[in-house]
Image (spheres, coloured by chain):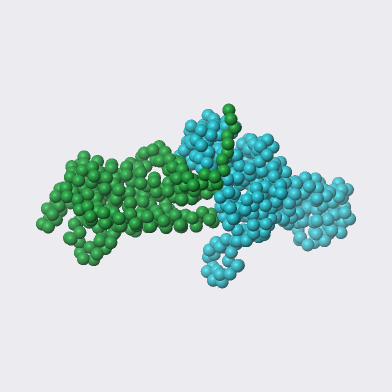
Amino acid sequence: MSSAIEARGLVKTYPAPKSKNKRKSKNNGEQDRVRALDGLCLSVPRGTIYAILGPNGAGKTTAVKILTTLARPDSGAAAVEGVDVLLAPRRAREVIGVVAQRSGADPTATGRENLVLQGHLYGLPTADARRRADELLDRFGLREAAGRNASTYSGGMQRRLDVALGLMHAPKVLFLDEPTTGLDPESRTAMWQEITRLAGDERMTVLLTTHYLEEADRLAHRLAIVDQGKVVAEGEPGQLKDELKGDVVQVELPARPREQEVRDTLTQVPGVRDVLVVGRGVSARSDDGAAAVPSVLAALANAGTPAVSVTVARPSLDEVYLRYTGRRYSEKDEVSVA
Amino acid sequence: MTAIDFPSRSRVSLLGPLTDTWYLTGRKLRALARQPWVLTMGVIQPVIWLFLFGDMFHKIIDIPGFGYQGSYLTYLVPGIVAMNAMSGNMWAGMSMIEEIERGTLNRFLVSPASRLAIMNASVAEQAVSTTVQTLIIVFLGMAGGARYPGGVAGVVVLTVASILIGVLWGALSNMTGMLLRSREAIIGVYTFFMLPLMFLSSAFMKASFLPGWMQAIASRNPLNWEVQIGRSALSATPDWSGIAVRSGALLVLAVLCVAISVRTFRSYAKNV
C-alpha cells in the first residue's frame, strides 16, 4: 500500500456544551452529544500534500487529534505509515511530526533549547540534536534569534519555530493544523514555499488543515472537503473544478428574492442548471456561460426581478465548496487576510 | 559531516522514562534559574509571617507550661517552612494549565516521550524549588536570631519533610488544574485549606494548649506532622523514632498523591 495515512469511518462525539435550558439536557441520550466526526474516511497517498478544507467546527482538528494519537475515536480505525494509531500509538508517534494550531514552543526557553529538547524526546543523542537544531535554525531563518527566548519572537518566527520543532526528528508524515492562520501575507507565502519543499525534496507526506480556499488550491496535490464531520468531496483541486463542467453565471439582485421563484424561473432557461440562491446572489452553471447570460437576464426581467450585475467565471474551489456543502464559503468562515 | 541517524525510540524504551525525566526536569530548572524572582517573590509572604508573628507573640513562650527551649522565632521556623511549601507549590497546577493552554503539553504528548517523565519533571521541580525556599527561610530566621541546636542534620531533615509536603501539595494542585482547568479553582482550594491547616497545628501554638477538638484534628494534619518533624529535628534532643514514623507517613501520603495525579494525567492524555 502506498497510503501514508488511512482513516476509516471515524466517529467522535463530545458531550454537548451545557445548555441554559436544563430541561433540555435531561434526556441523557445521543442527542446530548455533539458529533464532531461522523464517519470520516481519508486515504492520503505517500509523498503528497493533502489538504483538509472546511469551515471552523467541521471536524478538521478532531480528525488531526485522532490521527496524532491525542484523542480516541468512538469508532473507526486509523493508521499512519501502516502503524495503527489506536493499537500502537507509541510507534505511530515516532513516524509523525505535528505542528498544532497553538504554538507548543516553551516561551521561557531559547529557540535552540526548544529544538534540542525536542530532539532528546525523540531519542537523538545530544550532539546529533544540536546539529539537527542548527540545520533547522538555518533553514527557517532563525539563526540570529537562536539564543533568544522564544517569548521574544514575532508571530511569523514563532510559527517557523513550531514547524522546525515538528521536523526535528525527520518524520515521515507531517501534520500541520492551520499552519498559516494569523500570519501576514509575506510569512504565509514563505510557509507555502517551505511546505512545498518538504513534500518535494524530502518526500514527506504532509497533511494540512486549512480554512483558506486559496491555500488548499495553491498547495495541495489532493484535498478533501469536510463538512459536519464527513468528507463531502475528495480529489485533486483541478479535477474537482473540472467535474463542475462549464462556467458559473453569478447574478446579483437588488433585493433578497423569493428563493423558489428565482429557481423556477432559471431552471426553465435552456442550458442552465444547479441554481443556487444565497442572499441577494444567485449562481447557476452553464456549459457556455457567455451564451447563457442574455437569456438568464431576460428571464429574470420577465419575472419582475431584474439583475443589478452579472459575472461569468470559470469554476473555482469556492464553487466546488458551494456545490458539495450547499453553502457559499462565507466570509465568516474565511478569516480576512489583512 | 555524517548524516544524522534518526533512531527509533522503540529500541531504547527501557531507559526512556529516566532520560526523558532528566531532560524535561532540565527544562523546568532552566526556566526557574532564569526567573529567580519567581522563587524569591514566593518566599516573601512566609518570611513576613515569620518576623511579624515572631515579634508580635514573642512572649507566648513565657506562658507557664509552654516549655520550649529557645525563642518564639525559632519555634515558628518549621511552621513557616510548611506554610511556604504549601503556598509555593500551589503554582504547580497553574503552570500545568498554562502548558495545556499554550499547547506545550500536547507537543510532548504527540512525541514518544514517557508520560510518567512529564509528571516526574513536575515533582522534581517542586522538590528543588521547595528546597531553595526552605533554606532561604532557615537562613533568614537565623539572621533574625533563631538558633538551631539540631545543626545541619536537623536542617536536612526539615528540608526533606518540607519537600514531602511540597510534592504532596503540588500533586494535588496539578490534579485540580488538570480536572477543572481553572486557575480560580486552584486558588479556591488553596485558600480553603491554607489557614485552617496552619492553625489546626502546632505551627504557632503548643499543641497541648489547643482545645481538644483542635488537638484531635492537628494530630491527623499532615502539615502538623511536618512541623513536629522539623521542630524535633532542629532541637538539641531530636526524637528520632517520632521523626521516622511521621516522615514515613508523609512519604506514603506524598507517593499516594503523586500516584493519583499520574493517573489523572494518564486519563487526560488519552483524550485531549
Q: What percent of the width, then of the height, locates residue A81?
A: 65, 48
Location of residue B2 in the rendering, given as x and y in whole percent from the top left corner? 58, 30
Which quarter of the picture shows residue B128?
A: top left
Q: Is residue B186 visible?
A: no
Which residue is pictured at 60% across the width and 67% down the height?
A31
Identify the residue shown where x is 76% and y is 61%: A258
The residue at 34%/57% (across/down) is: B253
Judge whether B57 appears above or below B3 on screen. below
Residue in front for this viewpoint, B15 or B77: B15
How far across and how far down the image is residue B136, in percent?
28, 42
Q: Is residue A171 above or below residue B94?
A: above
Q: Is residue A332 above or below residue B40?
A: below
- Name the residue rendered at 60%, 58% in the picture: A73
- In what quadrant of the picture does the C terminus of chain A appear? top right
Residue extending farthest to the top is B1
Pick the residue in front: A312 or B84.
B84
Is residue A231 shown left or right of residue B51? right
* Residue A124 seen in the figure: yes
Q: Give the drawing colour for chain A.
A: cyan
Chain coloured green here:
B
Q: Residue furthest left?
A: B64
Q: Residue A133: give x, y in percent of width and height.
A: 54, 34
- Quarter of the rendering containing residue B149: top left
Total labels: the figure holds 0
Left or right of residue A76: residue A150: left
